[in-house]
Amino acid sequence: MSAKPFSFKLLKTDGMARRGEIETPHGIVSTPAFMPVGTQATVKAMYPGQVRETGADVVLGNTYHLMLRPTAERVARLGGLHTFMNWPHTILTDSGGFQVMSLAQLRKLDEDGVRFQSHIDGAKYHLTPERSVEIQGLLGSDIQMQLDECIKLPSPREEVERAMELSLRWAERSRRQFETMGGPEKGQGLYGIVQGGDVPDLRVRSAEELSKMPFEGYSVGGLAVGEPQDVMLRMLDITTPVMPVDKPRYLMGVGAPDDLLESVKRGIDQFDCVMPTRAGRHGLAYTRFGKVNLKNARHMDDPRPLDAETDCPASSVYSRAYLHHLVRAGEGLAAMILTWNNLAYYQSLMKGMRDAIETGTFDDFYQKTKADLARGDIAAL
């Protein structure tokens, strides 16, 4: 018996900003949405229930890491990724391609796929578009990604074009494998990935060609790889108008709060980034008024919480002096509290944008939030 089909509803727009809902077999994802990264089937320093309480509808798992350890076949035998990690809500898995390019050793890429050695033990693997989708199917994720080639920027135009065209061919192969495995009948979705580096006409061509393929959603890849923000935004300005209006749009690997704000303004619906969790593990808190580095001695005698006006206990209960002490002492609780605070802030930011789009006040929200972020946490300086 088929599951309810993957679906996306566009509920409201305000300029280019979009408010919508993605429905998967494991629930509704309100968009624009930030997806916490659970690379190894865990959002680091957080319990699954805590992640949900911050407002997250979906988390991300990583195909590369999970195929190496504990293996997709083992996860499948144990009931799939939702059961394995105790997350009964929507899960998105990436294709593993980015990690192969950035982490794996002795990789060799050709038309068929990429051969590489594990960064863990040197074991040899062969990842093809078909195998990537097979792994994601074994994991049982609700939203899956085509295998693509993500290259560093800047790169010569001919290299960007070669990688973009290869990614288009791999998109077709990924789609065939997804349908062979019955993804649509299971209510799952497969997203195509727009490539093209920082070359405008290649971005447009990639988006146009992908739009001809029957994907459930479309992603913008190959950004957030070290290029300046203005380059990323310029690519979004020319890419999102070419992407299908009736399908979700996902900007991969982004980003800082200001990146999220600017990208929603340009019509993006989904985001993921390790930034809030990684920052939390290194003593950095995100707040409505900028970043707070709890390593700094100025917080040693500060009795104030990070943000007394929020509902999140991590933000409103613990003093900056205590958090400074935990960070300087190397206590694990520091990472737990600061990650909790950061994810709660990110989800609050996304909810603020959703509410503003709903009421037609996105530009006001955008201007105020930009001003607050630019001001920084002046009282802590």
Image: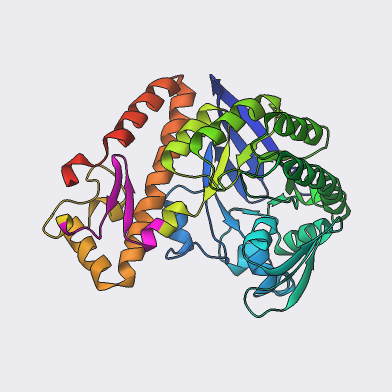
> Farthest residue toward the left?
301
Closer to the camera in the image, 363 or 73: 363
Q: Residue 118 at x, y = what percent?
A: 68, 73
- How many labels were placed on the picture? 0
Q: Confirm whether the magenta stretch covers residue 281.
A: yes
**Residue placed most toward the observer, 172 or 20:** 172
Q: Is residue 69 above or below residue 251?
A: below
Across and down, in percent, residue 210 comes to 78, 36
Residue at 60 percent across and 31 percent down: it is: 236
Apparent side of residue 209 relative to residue 269 in the rendered image (left or right) = right
Residue 46 visible (yes or no): yes
Residue at left 36%, top 62%?
282
Residue at the limit of the structure toward the front, as seen here: 156
> Would you say 222 lies left or right of 333 here?
right
Q: How is the image coloured?
A: rainbow
- Left or right relative to 318: residue 252: right
Residue 339 is left or right of residue 86, and the answer is left
Q: Which residues are magenta?
A: 279-297
* Residue 53, position as x, y percentages in the image: 42, 52
Q: Is residue 319 visible?
A: no
Q: Is residue 376 above or below residue 321?
A: above
Q: Is residue 326 magenta?
A: no
Which quadrant holds residue 85?
bottom right
Percent from the top left, x then y, of residue 268? 58, 33
